[in-house]
Image (tube, rainbow, N blue to C red):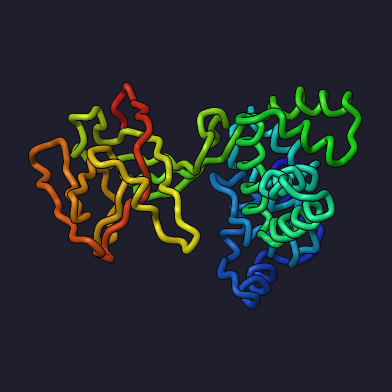
Amino acid sequence: MSYSELVDEYIRRSGLSLSEIANRMNERGIKIDRSYLSKLRNNPKYPASDEVNRLLAEVTGGDPDKLAFAGYVEKAPAEARKVLEHFFQHIDNYAKMVAFFFANQDQEDDELFQEMDSIYGKINTLPFEKKFDFVLHYFNRMAAARKDIFQDFGNVWGVPQKGIDHSIDSYTKLPLIRTKVVDLLHDTVDYEWTPAEKLTHGEYIYIITNDDSMSGSNIGKGSKILCKLIEKEEDGSKSDGSIESGKIYAVIHQDHMLIRRVFLDEQQAITLSADHPKYPPIFIRPQDDSFSVLAKVVSVEFDPNGND
């Protein structure tokens, strides 16, 4: 059953009018109207958010997880939906594997199980869509980076070798990660599915550029660039040691995202340099709170038609 069909079913079974449903949701802090609900039940271009879907299901007496998942899947390409349905059916097992991955495995079994349970509990406190994203993201990175995680996990839980081999064969055929796409050209944020093997070792986003400032590096207006987010320290601050002078980064300067080549001097002052001469360099003093480095540019994908 598709997302819109499920929304329609929940609305019909509730016996409530669209206005009544909207009013009840408004009373609980979600501001929507009957026309928006009508769109959701009639093949919307974009499903509602996880928060809206969950409350809509609660108000109409439906299953919040089921509707949230239906909205999640609706945003995915058709070829990915079977994979996502599999993950949904086994999400708890995958969450346990991710917990195992994060746990310190160089400890006694009792301590390992205790830490895994703690991590698993924290994962389960996430809202559904964030939980699903988190588990899917890290599981697929695990599968792409090291298949022996299945062997380790199976050994800890006493899974027969035949079952471990089956898991390795089956689960590593599900290599998708949902990746944020920040479109500076149209001022939108969306998501798309990317092969996990392309995104190993770190967090990534796509950025669609809105100018030709880096055209000398083959990054034209409307180019789609894959960027690796800068790792944070334990206190949440960005690691300056991970910035390589002369490389191209996505940066935030005075609340604007820019793509620039970043140069550091010995006093840690920063120069942001564009390739195109019509964009003057920007000089950043150390400890300037209006500036931060977001991500390093990894690769560029081109639109051969030059569409805006």
Q: Residue at x 61, y 33 (%)?
A: 176
Q: Is residue 288 above or below residue 302?
A: below
Q: Residue at x 37, y 46 (%)?
A: 242
Q: Is residue 3 above or below residue 302?
A: below
Count of marks, rendered view: 0
State the quadrant of the N terminus: top right
User: Looking at the image, which residue sits at the far bottom?
Assistant: 27
Q: Nearer the viewer, residue 41 or 209?
A: 209
Write down the quadrant of residue 185 in the picture.
top left
| x and y, in percent, of residue 112 in the image | 78, 51
| x and y, in percent, of residue 182 in the image | 40, 46
Q: Residue at x 59, y 56 (%)?
A: 49
Q: Residue at x 47, y 41 (%)?
A: 204
Q: Is residue 49 above or below residue 76?
A: below
Judge from the rendering whether residue 207 lies leftward or rightward of residue 137; answer left or right: left
| x and y, in percent, of residue 57 in the image | 73, 60
Judge from the rendering whether residue 219 lies leftward or rightward of residue 190; answer left or right: left
Q: Is residue 25 above or below residue 229?
A: below
Write down the quadrant of residue 55 in the picture.
bottom right
Residue 12 in view here: no
Q: Nearer the viewer, residue 305 or 271?
A: 271
| x and y, in percent, of residue 175 in the image | 63, 29
